[in-house]
Image (cartoon, grey):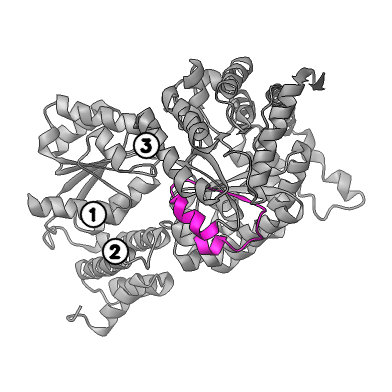
């Protein structure tokens, strides 16, 4: 962060330190009064999210910080994005495409939403297709979106069979070798990974990000 | 010789078996060695699988539900059984109250899917003040109409606090409103269904007891933080409140601890049973920092635990997910008063930290029980017996969160069989 001026560094620090009121006031001032480049302000947000992710990984931050960081980012984005002129600024290069959803029979989404958010701020393009997703819908969405990674989420024990069924259907549709499959959720462990035929499982959002990063680096 | 439990006859042999089973659990709580390792039977929809009925039937058909759950108890001979009818056969009650916080078979999910909770914001952050000022008023005018359809007319009711003299009658005009009358009529009908449910529950408990099996816990309670996070603010709302409404949140948690402790003690007296099951949702290592746990989660819960212990109750918190980092903190309670049930925390590690403080319950993993073989279940029980029970630990064997819905019956047989084989 050597190339930041004092005000920019302040914004990154306040965002990363969960100082929501000061961070939002400063972001507003920079965008609306000082007319700073909105792309630059969003870049500062991304830097702050890197710090948040690192602190999460190191065990200093937990779910409350990820949720609050996500909301601060949304709030700054809501002001900044309309200010970005058409055609101004090239879209950032994405690391890869991840399709994610909660398997059929299961309505839980808190964990899935946090994983989607963490993937997004870590440079992945994420398509979240919701909860209680039937097998056919996964196949249809995969064919249209062509993801590099498919994430299956589930909180209940019934999700073990739903995940297995979904992954088997990928096989039968001849899609299984086109992407990696990761699973996650409250009861997921190595036994469930082996049972479902997934490539890997993660116990939190950072593990999901690391799995995707490693797969993209190896590809 | 025999005695009657309600209308059901209990033989002397059944009474002796009942007493021995109950004493086994109580000995563990007192940190004394029972004659053999007790085993609990706790489940949600697994009895439907066991008895060959649908999840919907287990939720709606009182007679079938009683039949399959009692049959499971008779086959496995557990030392204590969860109040399975109150826990699951609630479909008719949910329907009559027009309950909005769950989706259940016929109401959002299929006939063979479990009920699932809808995580939503049922109280806004701006309403903390209303709750603090007048919790009962908040319930009557805001909260109950939000979660129970039958209470929808109650938002029209007058504010009671401040009424006096003739005002106490003038103010009552809303009771004559058609929507308020309709609410009252629906509430009476719904309460009758709750009475029916409880009559079946009592009959089921009497049959269970008459056959020689104790109810493991009479009541169920929730920690102050979890009540607020799960049932009021919603998961993400509560997480943001840790930063945005820190001070108010602490006041609400403290007030909730007092309210809930009083309620739990009253309910336990009505149930005439000392053990209270407390599933814990928001304590896991991964959910908040140690500092946040010590600042927000633990103090109101400890207050609740101590209140229950002083009232001669036996709290049985069930620490969901992995709570390894919390063990030293939650150790701060008197010895020989609680059962700590762990879901994914390594039970051997929990024994090392808490063995001289609480009885332990658990914890065969859901993935093992649902996808493993009977031989693998047997080995997992042996591991717990070798490393906890045989070293003097007061272990009550069970699944990590009871028997998962999809568990093959042979794996449950393996669990109970291994308990008898390795620990008496």
Looking at the figure, which quarter contains the N terminus of chain B?
top right
In this picture, residue A191 sits left or right of residue A198: right
Are the residues flagged by discs 2 and 3 from a single subunit?
no
Are the residues flagged by discs 1 and 3 from a single subunit?
no
In this picture, residue A186 sits left or right of residue B277: left
Residue B334 lies within the magenta run:
yes
Query: How far is the residue under mark 1 from the one under mark 3?
Result: 24 Å
Q: Position of residue B254 (x, y in %)?
A: 65, 61
Q: Is the residue A169 above or below the residue B274 in the image? A: above
Mark 2 vs mark 3, foreground winner is 3
Please report the bounds of the magenta region as a residue range: B327-354
Marker disc for residue B367: 3
Are the residues flagged by discs 1 and 2 from a single subunit?
yes
Nearer to me, B40 or B295: B40
Q: Secondary structure at mark 1?
A: helix
Q: Give the quadrant of residue B11.
A: top right
Badge 1 or badge 2: first in the primary sequence: 2
Q: Position of residue B266 (x, y in %)?
A: 77, 45
Q: Residue at x 27, y 79 (%)?
A: A9
Nearer to me, B331 or A56: B331
Query: How far is the residue under mark 2 from the one under mark 3?
Result: 30 Å
Q: Give the quadrant of residue A91.
A: bottom left
Looking at the figure, which quarter contains the C terminus of chain B?
top right
Marker disc for residue A209: 1
């Amino acid at each position: 962060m050597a190339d930041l001026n004092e005000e920019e560094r302040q914004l990154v620090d306040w965002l990363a330190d969960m100082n929501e009121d000061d961070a939002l006031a400063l972001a507003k001032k920079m965008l609306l009064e000082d007319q700073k480049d909105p792309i630059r302000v969003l870049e500062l947000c991304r830097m702050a999210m890197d710090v948040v992710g690192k602190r999460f990984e190191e065990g200093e931050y937990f779910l409350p910080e990820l949720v609050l960081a996500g909301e601060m980012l949304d709030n700054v984005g809501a002001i900044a994005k309309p200010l970005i002129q058409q055609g101004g600024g090239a879209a950032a290069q994405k690391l890869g495409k991840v399709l994610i959803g909660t398997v059929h029979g299961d309505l839980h989404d808190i964990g899935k939403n946090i994983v989607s958010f963490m993937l997004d701020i870590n440079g992945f393009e994420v398509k979240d297709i919701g909860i209680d997703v039937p097998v056919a819908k996964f196949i249809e969405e995969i064919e249209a979106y062509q993801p590099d990674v498919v994430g299956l989420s589930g909180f209940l024990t019934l999700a073990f069979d739903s995940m297995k069924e979904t992954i088997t259907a990928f096989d039968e549709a001849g899609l299984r070798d086109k992407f990696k499959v990761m699973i996650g959720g409250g009861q997921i462990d190595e036994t469930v990974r082996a049972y479902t035929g997934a490539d890997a499982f993660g116990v939190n959002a950072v593990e999901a990000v690391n799995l995707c990063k490693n797969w993209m680096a190896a590809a | 010789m025999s005695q009657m439990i309600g209308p059901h006859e209990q033989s002397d042999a059944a009474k002796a078996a009942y007493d021995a089973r109950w004493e086994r659990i109580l000995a563990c709580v007192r940190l004394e060695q029972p004659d053999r390792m007790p085993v609990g039977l706790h489940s949600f929809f697994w009895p439907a699988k066991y008895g060959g009925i649908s999840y919907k039937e287990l939720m709606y058909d009182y007679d079938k539900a009683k039949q399959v759950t009692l049959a499971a108890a008779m086959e496995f001979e557990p030392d204590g059984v969860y109040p399975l009818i109150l826990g699951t056969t609630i479909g008719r009650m949910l329907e009559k109250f027009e309950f909005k916080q769950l989706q259940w078979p016929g109401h959002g999910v299929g006939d063979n899917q479990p009920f699932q909770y809808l995580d939503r914001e049922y109280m806004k952050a701006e309403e903390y003040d209303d709750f603090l000022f007048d919790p009962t008023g908040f319930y009557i005018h805001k909260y109950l109409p939000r979660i129970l359809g039958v209470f929808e007319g109650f938002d029209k009711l007058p504010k009671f606090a401040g009424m006096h003299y003739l005002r106490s009658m003038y103010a009552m005009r809303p009771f004559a409103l058609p929507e308020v009358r309709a609410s009252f009529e629906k509430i009476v009908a719904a309460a009758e269904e709750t009475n029916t449910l409880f009559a079946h529950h009592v009959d089921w408990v009497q049959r269970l007891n008459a056959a020689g099996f104790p109810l493991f816990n009479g009541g169920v309670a929730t920690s102050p933080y979890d009540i607020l996070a799960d049932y009021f603010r919603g998961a993400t709302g509560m997480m943001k409140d840790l930063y945005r409404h820190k001070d108010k949140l602490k006041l609400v948690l403290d007030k909730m601890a007092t309210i809930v402790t009083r309620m739990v003690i009253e309910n336990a007296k009505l149930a005439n049973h000392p053990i209270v099951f407390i599933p814990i949702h928001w304590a896991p290592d991964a959910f908040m920092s140690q500092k946040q746990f010590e600042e927000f989660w633990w103090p109101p819960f400890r207050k609740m635990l101590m209140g229950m212990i002083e009232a001669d109750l036996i709290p049985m918190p069930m620490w969901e997910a992995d709570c390894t980092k919390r063990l030293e903190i939650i150790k701060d309670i008197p010895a020989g008063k609680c059962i700590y049930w762990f879901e994914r925390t390594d039970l051997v590690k929990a024994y090392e930290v808490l063995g001289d403080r609480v009885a332990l319950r658990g914890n065969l993993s859901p993935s093992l029980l649902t996808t493993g073989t009977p031989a693998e279940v047997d080995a997992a029980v042996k591991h717990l017996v070798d490393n906890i029970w045989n070293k003097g630990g007061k272990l009550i064997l069970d699944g990590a969160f009871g028997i998962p819905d999809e568990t093959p019956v042979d794996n449950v047989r393996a669990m109970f069989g291994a308990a008898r084989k390795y620990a008496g």
